[in-house]
């Protein structure tokens, strides 16, 4: 059996993709920068870095399928160019190696942030959007990386693109910005909320969506992997019901959140310490990231479960692993 390469297997979503593949009996090879960070996975491990083309050539050698899940997922970085090197040039490096190695299929993990958000309806894969609409280095770098994936697909490499929304669940090691909402709520650090919204999805279902995209997706096409459109207030209310806590009732005006974001990010740029409220996150919060799942349901057979179970697993995992 030829191996399947998974990048990002030491991270939240990549870990779940690798776990799903292993459970299905596939031979999984994980590209990692540090072997000590591979947790609870029994596949092969290969050392490498998206910024090191030679290491990627070794990683993809003999592989039939590549799941490119890895990304530099930060809403603030003292040196934003790091995100472009990993997300844009790293994607180009990996897809070049995959093409040269004769890989039969690539699933590229983009983000819902690359989906256009019309004012009058939920966004979908055909919603028009442009680079100048991307807030911050993370979204801009992922938008450009998605264009790289499209470029390779047009040139003949079978690349399917998935756009996860906001996965939630267990094994959110870092945690991700979505997981941080859960952690901050459990620690009592979210006494108020802004009027924004996210589409939440169980991370296990997101991982399953990757496998479905590999099996049924069309090269060069995008598929949104999400579940429930929820306001931040609704998410916090559900967390309160699950955890036994209280949901915050005070809504922060956007102008106040923006000012706090500017101050927090300015201080972070001086000190090098991550801001509590990155200005890019505040800018993203101005739009409710509500999307339609019709295409993934119709074309892939994607059928996500309600997110309450995933929220409970997240709460339990963060509590039992010392995050709270």
Image (spheres, rainbow, N blue to C red):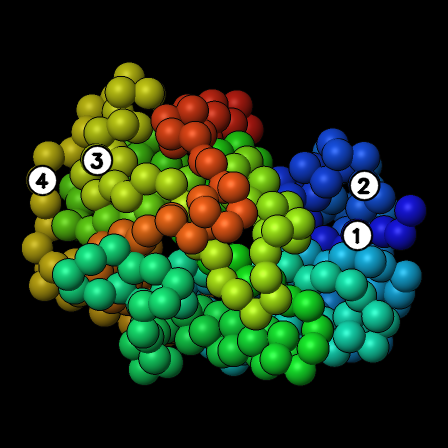
Does the residue at mark 1 contact the one at mark 3 (Cβ under 8 Å)? no
Q: Position of residue 249 (x, y in %)?
A: 10, 35
Among the two numbered marks 2 and 3 on one chain, the one whose residue lies closer to the N terminus: 2
Tell me, yes or no, if residue 131 can be seen here: yes
Pointer 3 residue: 234
Among the two numbered marks 2 and 1 on one chain, the one whose residue lies closer to the N terminus: 1
For marks 4 and 3, give the one nearer the viewer: 3
Among the two numbered marks 4 and 2 on one chain, the one whose residue lies closer to the N terminus: 2
For marks 2 and 3, give the one nearer the viewer: 2
Does the residue at mark 2 contact the one at mark 1 (Cβ under 8 Å)? yes
Pointer 4 residue: 250
Which labelled disc corresponds to residue 26?
A: 2
Q: CA gap, disc 1 to disc 3?
A: 38 Å
Q: Position of residue 270 (x, y in %)?
A: 37, 73
Determine crowd level at label 2: few under 14, some 14-19, many 20+ residues with C-alpha closer than 10 A.
Answer: some
Determine crowd level at label 1: few under 14, some 14-19, many 20+ residues with C-alpha closer than 10 A.
Answer: many
Among the two numbered marks 4 and 3 on one chain, the one whose residue lies closer to the N terminus: 3
Q: Quadrant of residue 32?
A: bottom right
Q: Would you place residue 145 above or below residue 179 in this image?
A: below
Pointer 1 residue: 4
Q: Quadrant of residue 63?
A: bottom right
Q: Would you place residue 1 above or below residue 130 in this image?
A: above
For marks 1 and 3, give the one nearer the viewer: 1
Q: CA gap, disc 2 to disc 1?
A: 7 Å
């Amino acid at each position: 059996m030829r191996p399947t390469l998974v990048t990002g297997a030491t991270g939240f979503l990549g870990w779940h993709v690798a776990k799903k593949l292993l459970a299905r009996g596939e031979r999984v090879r994980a590209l990692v920068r540090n072997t000590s960070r591979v947790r609870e996975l029994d596949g092969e491990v290969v050392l490498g870095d998206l910024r090191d083309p030679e290491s990627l050539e070794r990683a993809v050698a003999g592989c039939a399928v590549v799941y490119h899940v890895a990304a530099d997922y930060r809403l603030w970085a003292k040196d934003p160019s790091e995100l472009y090197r990993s997300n844009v040039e790293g994607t180009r490096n990996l897809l070049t190696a995959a093409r040269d190695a004769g890989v039969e299929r690539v699933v590229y993990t983009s983000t819902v942030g690359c989906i256009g958000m019309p004012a009058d309806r939920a966004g979908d894969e055909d919603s028009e959007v442009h680079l100048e609409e991307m807030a911050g280095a993370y979204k801009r770098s992922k938008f450009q990386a998605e264009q790289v994936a499209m470029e390779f697909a047009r040139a003949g490499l079978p690349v399917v693109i998935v756009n996860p929304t906001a996965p939630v669940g267990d094994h959110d090691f870092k945690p991700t910005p979505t997981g941080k909402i859960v952690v901050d709520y459990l620690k009592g650090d979210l006494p108020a909320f802004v009027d924004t919204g996210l589409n939440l999805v169980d991370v296990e279902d997101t991982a399953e969506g990757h496998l479905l995209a590999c099996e049924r997706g069309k090269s060069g096409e995008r598929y949104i992997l999400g579940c429930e459109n929820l306001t931040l207030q609704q998410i916090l209310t559900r967390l309160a019901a699950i955890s036994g806590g209280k949901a915050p009732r005070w809504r922060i005006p956007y102008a106040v959140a923006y000012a706090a974001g500017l101050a927090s990010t300015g201080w972070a740029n001086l000190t090098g310490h991550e801001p509590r409220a990155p200005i890019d996150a505040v800018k993203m919060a101005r739009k409710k990231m509500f999307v339609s799942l019709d295409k993934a349901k119709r074309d892939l057979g994607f059928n996500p479960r309600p997110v309450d179970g995933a929220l409970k697993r997240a709460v339990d995992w963060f509590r039992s692993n010392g995050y709270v």
